[in-house]
Image (cartoon, coloured by chain):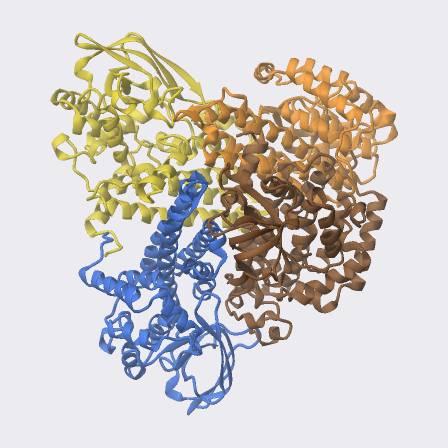
Chain colours: A brown, B yellow, C blue, D orange
Amino acid sequence: MDLNYTADELAFRDEVRKFTAANLPKDIQRKVLEHRRLEKDDMVRWQDILARKGWLTGHWPKQFGGLGWSPVEIHVFDEETAALGAPRLVPFGLNMVAPVIMAFGSKWQQDHYLTRIRENKDWWCQGYSEPGSGSDLASLKTRAVRDGDHYVVNGQKTWTTLGQHADMIFCLVRTNTEVRKQEGISFLLMDMHAPGITVRPIFTLDEEHEVNEVFFDNVRVPAQNLVGEEGKGWTYAKYLLGHERTGIAGVGASKRELATLKEIAKKQQRNGKPLSEDPLFASRIADVELELMALEMTVMRVLANRGKAPGPEASILKIKGTEIQQAITELLMDAMGDYALPFDPEWNTLEGADHAPGPEYAAPMAARYFNYRKVTIYGGSNEIQRNIIAQMVLGL
Amino acid sequence: MDLNYTADELAFRDEVRKFTAANLPKDIQRKVLEHRRLEKDDMVRWQDILARKGWLTGHWPKQFGGLGWSPVEIHVFDEETAALGAPRLVPFGLNMVAPVIMAFGSKWQQDHYLTRIRENKDWWCQGYSEPGSGSDLASLKTRAVRDGDHYVVNGQKTWTTLGQHADMIFCLVRTNTEVRKQEGISFLLMDMHAPGITVRPIFTLDEEHEVNEVFFDNVRVPAQNLVGEEGKGWTYAKYLLGHERTGIAGVGASKRELATLKEIAKKQQRNGKPLSEDPLFASRIADVELELMALEMTVMRVLANRGKAPGPEASILKIKGTEIQQAITELLMDAMGDYALPFDPEWNTLEGADHAPGPEYAAPMAARYFNYRKVTIYGGSNEIQRNIIAQMVLGL
Amino acid sequence: MNFSLTEEQQLLADSLARFFERDYTFEKRRAIQKSPEGFGRDAWAQLAEMGIVALPLPADHGGFGGGAADMLPVMKALGAGLLTEPYLATAILGAGLIARAGTAEQKASVLPGVAEGKRVLALALRDAEGAAVKVAGDGKGWTLDGKKRVVLHGGQADTLVVVAAVGGGHAAFLVDRKTPGVTVRDYRTIDGLRGADVTLAGVKVAADSRVGGDADVTKALRATLDAGAAALCAEAVGVMEQLNTLTLDYIKTRQQFGQPIGRFQVLQHRAVDMFISAEQSKSMAYLAGMRAEAGDSAAVAGAARYVAREGRKVAKEAIQLHGGMGVTNELPAAHYAKRATMIGFWLDQLA
Amino acid sequence: MNFSLTEEQQLLADSLARFFERDYTFEKRRAIQKSPEGFGRDAWAQLAEMGIVALPLPADHGGFGGGAADMLPVMKALGAGLLTEPYLATAILGAGLIARAGTAEQKASVLPGVAEGKRVLALALRDAEGAAVKVAGDGKGWTLDGKKRVVLHGGQADTLVVVAAVGGGHAAFLVDRKTPGVTVRDYRTIDGLRGADVTLAGVKVAADSRVGGDADVTKALRATLDAGAAALCAEAVGVMEQLNTLTLDYIKTRQQFGQPIGRFQVLQHRAVDMFISAEQSKSMAYLAGMRAEAGDSAAVAGAARYVAREGRKVAKEAIQLHGGMGVTNELPAAHYAKRATMIGFWLDQLA
């Protein structure tokens, strides 16, 4: 048992820090640190920078053009870039569809799509949830019918994050209605620019456009875009779930937000004293900080076990990570006092920020609190995560 | 809508206060206020005093020798006596079997048993739970078989509170195994001194003897002790449930304990200052106090609706009341610091108290904390109460 | 004690319920919010017509002299209807201070217009950091300088009641919003209301615009704020109850795994805790009303803290139990949730 | 980073598991607790025999020089076995301070006997209210007066290590428990251990009994307490994990309404939260071990607070999920629950 980083791991951490500090565009960094809206271009620019360095896919195996980072290196990269204010990488291509294509895709799919993802050419989104199929994903209804060397797709997906920017979507579709519901599902890669696809925005509590409904009206998808075998989509989706979880704890971003919170608490006044000196508020901060310290170590323990398949224990990372994220947004909102109230989506840019009343950091906080209600719902709600632990770990 | 007590109610409150202050024996009061063990004699003495005044059964209808107090008067009596440190009245005769006998008992049962309860002659206990039947009470197995003008009872009850002192027990027994489980249950009054009854103590976490197992080995019970009709026991038990709840919130006792807590917090030192000045501890006290203020008003609202049958909303009183009771025991324990640790059941008397280390109030606190874990379990666990609200109030 | 509504109270509650059902639908409200002024003038006229605006005002100045027991069901209804109009600002806070501390002339000149729905008030209470309002008087009038932050409905008010710390106590001034030197920075608040930062730069008002003449208004202000906090507690209860109703409807309807999700015990118990929160908050609202009238500000502050916390808790759970739908702005539930979450910040201003 | 046990660590953990299964059963433990001394001398000898007592002691004085990584699995096992013997008091606290601050002679004279299980120590740390230990020295020896409260295993120790505030720093003295003037008020603690109030009335000890001679022991004391707190965190994790195992066994077995109660989703989610508490606490115990060695007392204190809180939470839920059985003293679960609840009070003394 050795509870410290190795020298190599420490050196890698320093390299990531240095590179990020030198290459992360300041305007993007400011948007992240100040909680302003990130545009498509912001995310693409940062990912291009990483792609040129090879780090966009540092976590990919070498055979697919990655750098074959170890689990600890992946963790260090995620957390250190986040801590410095880098945007979260859009995961749908890099971390979600890519592992599935690597494991189950055809040679053509691997050559074509993995290369484009590595070079940051395609923006991917995810087509899983449907209006009637949320937690009960296997009940999905979007239908794909084989017609020669194409599938014809009809139906609707929802909660499609950043789908408005997307070039590609990976979808779970029903190819067979005669078998058990899990066995009739296939995994299809679709061009978002194909005729018959309509994207409609869903506005969230903070009046932002982050998620979408995607409608399929007789969309023709080449059969070569079927991943693996027909009817095996559910298996691939579950495989993907296991690969999705490394960064889900969001320790680096939470550390960054906690530091922001502490800074702000020093500036904000409450009863004639800095808020940071209010014992009750300080104690709320300390509680979150302790949770985060524990979670970081839990992440390391999960990573250290990564020889084995990532177990359902990883659901802890989702539950605790998102609870901490929410707790911090709540503290940030509360730190604003009544200046948490004024609201206008126009203030959510670097320019608009100047027009908001109150201190410059105040305007996004309540909106962010409401936006972050999603994190305990998406990616398998925390209730579903608890069901998973109950069944898979505790044997209940 | 009038949110204040009437003049009559205020006068009654003063009368209860005055009488209690003048007549509650000081040694008993001290035991209650200092959290020492109450002996059988303590409880009997206080109930005798109330019986002589007629107040032991003030809440009974006049036709059964009571004073026909209004719901508000009953509440005032319960809360004011508790606030002054009177022992809680042993409810099994007064508030549990009595309403059942009044509603469903024979003339003989009413004349005989109600009189004896009113005069504090019999100590009753309750025979509901069995080792295999806790939350799922209807699955009980204790068997009563008719044999001429007797029932012969075999089986076992458990968690029989203060059964070691009891003269009588009211039992749910199975008289028919052929019908739906709820329909085979009857309500039987049994003499605890009858041959074939054995009482065995169960020691609780605090090493006290408060609950018991009761074994029945061919106990012969006169058929005249069957309440109402055979097979209707479940109905009577449910009727009783509705009558059990008035005092369950325990507002008066919690107010008293909260006052004790505040006094102690002034005396205890933490980091060189009185604990009462520790902002985090003070805030924990304030939170409980607010819950209690709200609960007291909720009780009044339930009482004001008492024209109608007491609804399942009353489950709130059980849930919140017991959560508050536990929160206060926890604060009292925490206020002790490391003097919460020393433990000896011998110290749980007025004499033994002098032998305990630490401040005179310290010794019972941790034991009391553990003892009070029971309150969210007994009388229908708080989980069962939530099920009741979900089904009966929210229609889930 | 008696918690039943009187016949008058019941009639008023019923007519408010009808108002929200017929005339102040969710769509109507959204349209009002999107309008530049953010203020439904016709809805306001209707409320005045119904006597709701006049209810808490003194009987000898066009009001009905309603007390805490009268305001409770009304505020609960306004919460359940998610009213965005400046009721609290006008009828409870602004008019409340004038009624308690104003001179006979001030009451006579301001309150009847308020009661009829013709004059909207706002109480400019909290000083902006480092910009406390300074008062200078020369016998003929007063000059005000400073800045007020997050004034509830400051941008919709005809008359601002500007509070200032003066000689160890407090003074308040009636200031027409259009007075030279008054700058009102009007904005939406995230819970669907309007707030404003109000800057006063050498604002000159007449000698008789000081509320109550030279008397210290501290006590009247405290009583007004307590009444406001109690009213807001009741409003919060209306919001919570509606949120619970919507959530129950949703979980009874939404099907997953072949059954309504409300059949899952975990969601049941969480719905129960939401219900308990609302019930306990309702008790606290009663308590706040009683204690506000008895002058027990500490109890009102406690009640406010409690209701604010429970409101936020209920909002969180309502969103979570709505799943994905809970984070969209489309459902009424989302708007109730935002209101329930933020109401604590308004209560903080008062209690 | 590497969280796997070394071969030696694994062997020790296995032999401890065997010890608790064969030689230190629940019945054995209850018998020890009911004995007048409250101390299983043969169990202690076995632990010494296995090298457990010697593990944290320095290698040049009969120990194995074990660090935080070695102590973690051991303390977890002692927690899981609910050991009542004075391991923390002797091997981690008493010996720890001597090893860190003692003179060569003191180490040589005390530690080998400790390692062999022949000498039991206790650290008399906290002064009783208003009775801080006073130290007077005349060159030939020291006189101690005062009172220590709730000394862990003070009544079982052969030698008390008495801490006193001296000239802005701290001194510690080796005091034989049988020295005239030492009165030890030995008692049970509710979590199954023993504590004592120790009164020192004109207690005379030799000049060379001051730990480390005239040097200030403050830093060594802090390091010792941090190591103790980290060890106790690990012990708490062992208690919690065992409590979770027992609770899971119970809810998988206990039948109500025709099925094991563990089928009810509400109990499932609560069991999950208990599991998460234990996992997060385990992480905190690792962290506490690392940070204690790095001298970061603030982090150790934070970890201790966290583990104490989670331990109590797990204990509450374990009792509640056991229903009526949870409040009886018969089940092992009850004893684990009491230990998990109270461990925070001991941690408070250290962290």
- Spot the residue most to the bottom: C140
In the foreground, A71 or A139: A139
Residue D297 % position (x, y) = 72, 44
Q: Nearer the viewer, residue C69 or C335?
A: C335
State left or right for residue A223 relative to residue A22.
left
Q: Is residue C192 left or right of residue A303?
A: left
Asked if residue D207 is positioned above or below residue C239 in the image, the reply reads above
Residue drawn at x 33%, y 68% is C24
Answer whether residue B18 is visible to the viewer in this image. no
Q: Position of residue C78 (x, y in %)?
A: 33, 64
> Up-down: is D77 above or below B362?
above
Q: Quadrant of residue C10?
A: bottom left
Q: Nearer the viewer, residue A87 or A364?
A: A87
Q: Position of residue C167 (x, y in %)?
A: 47, 77
Residue D236, relative to residue C115: is it above or below? above
Observer able to see residue C257: yes
Q: What is the quadrant of the N terminus of chain A in the image?
A: top right
- State the residue lying farthest toward the front: A148
Marker count (numbered) = 0
Query: Residue D112 at x, y = what percent?
Result: 82, 21
Find residue B230 and report its image quarter: top left
